[in-house]
Image (cartoon, grey):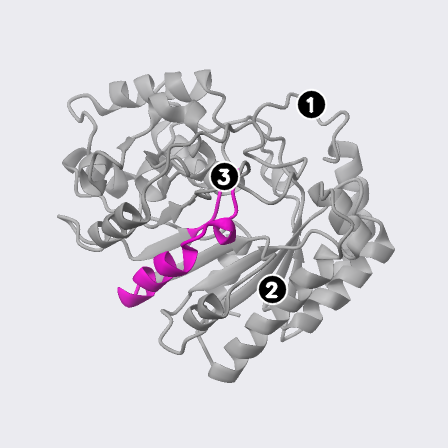
Amino acid sequence: MTGQLFERIAYKHKYFETPEALLEQVINKTVVPYQVELQPGRLTGRKICWMECPYCYGASSENVSDRLTPERYIDIMRQMTDGPHGGVAKIIFAGYATDPLNYEHIDDLVEISRHHGQITGFHSKLLRASDRLIDLLTRQDAAATSYMTVSVDAGSSESYNTTHGVKISGDVYHRVIENLKRICQLRDQRRSHLDMAANYLLTRVNSDTKTVEQGLRDIIDTGVDVIRFSFPQLPRGSESVDGTVIPNRAEIEEIYQRLKPVIDDHTSDKTNVVLLDVDGESAFTERRTLPCFARFIYPAISYDGYLSNCSQSGAPHFRDMSLGNLQEVDFWDAFYNYDTEDIWLTYELQHTKITKNDCRCDRKEHTVNRIFQNAFGNKPHA
């Protein structure tokens, strides 16, 4: 496992040199995003995701029919590699209310990214993966620090179905474990640069010690490099953890103290296992941290084809704060479409929309935005 992978897992990675340097690049319109996240939405069917996870960030999203055509997606990806001030070096495939592996043409998008030598990141439930996709991800020429992170969140078939809101009786859990094992084995055989990680969000229904211990054994046996245990955040549209599977602060502290020695006991030179209580350690109590610079560091192409501020605002109810409809506007035209005459006024107008739309930072965004808050104070006030 690379040091960078652990830094990302633990929310310690730096995505820019200094806040002052990034602000200067923003004002001069020479900033290039550290990464762009693609959240492709399924083209057919009633659902854009195969799960109904009760803690899903994007559970309040509407499955509108707007989509980028497969041809336009490939065109946009090619545009990103050749901007006026440099190309995007890193592409992340993930989703807000979606799973990238549920998109019919995901293999084609990954192949484009691989062709251009970009670092490739993947966040998925890994319910299925084609032979072509696994081949693309595990090739020896994969860019260093490319990775896949799989949300397992369970230690048994029963806990998996309860945690993810699975309505079928099938054994989804062991299907995911076997898919993880397939990828890790081929990665090892080819000595690919692909880093493999598994996430386990601890909830009220999957955090008993026996289930966690079994999950540790199963996931470690797949050959992943790192396993991160953490706790879900309250998603947009929810005001309280009451009546949900999300533990409250007292429950989190109890789970943490009980499972910390169990989890620490399973870490090894081969698999680094970590338990994080990010909200507690960093005192994240607010729903968003302003000023928000995520739009310039890691914007996202949402499932409806709009260029969004970040991974957490990739849905139709954030359209009035999106950067542009990529079905109609090219990538760099949308990315650089902002007023720099009074940058803090620009921010204030955007933050008014962020607050109105109940846009919520994930932990990565909280961590990064706090650096700017410390550097520039609470400007702008919104």
Horizontally, residue 278 falls left or right of residue 212, namely left
**Image-based side of 265 in relation to 33, left or right:** right
Provide the residue designation for mark 3: 96
In which quadrant will I find the C terminus?
A: top left
For residue 248, which quarter of the picture? top right
- Three-letter amino acid code at the position of disc 3: Tyr
Asked whether residue 102 is drawn in magenta, I would say: yes
Q: Nearer the viewer, residue 138 or 240?
A: 138
Residue carrying label 1: 240
Image check: 128 left or right of 333? Answer: right
Residue, far front: 45
Residue 226 numbered mark, or none: 2
Span colored in magenta: 93-118
Q: Mark 3–mark 1 contact, CB under 8 Å?
A: no
Do the residues under discs 1 and 2 have CB atoms within 8 angstroms?
Answer: no
Callout 2: 10 Å neighbours few (<14), some, many (20+)? many
Q: Is residue 25 above or below residue 287?
A: below
Q: Is residue 5 above or below residue 164?
A: below
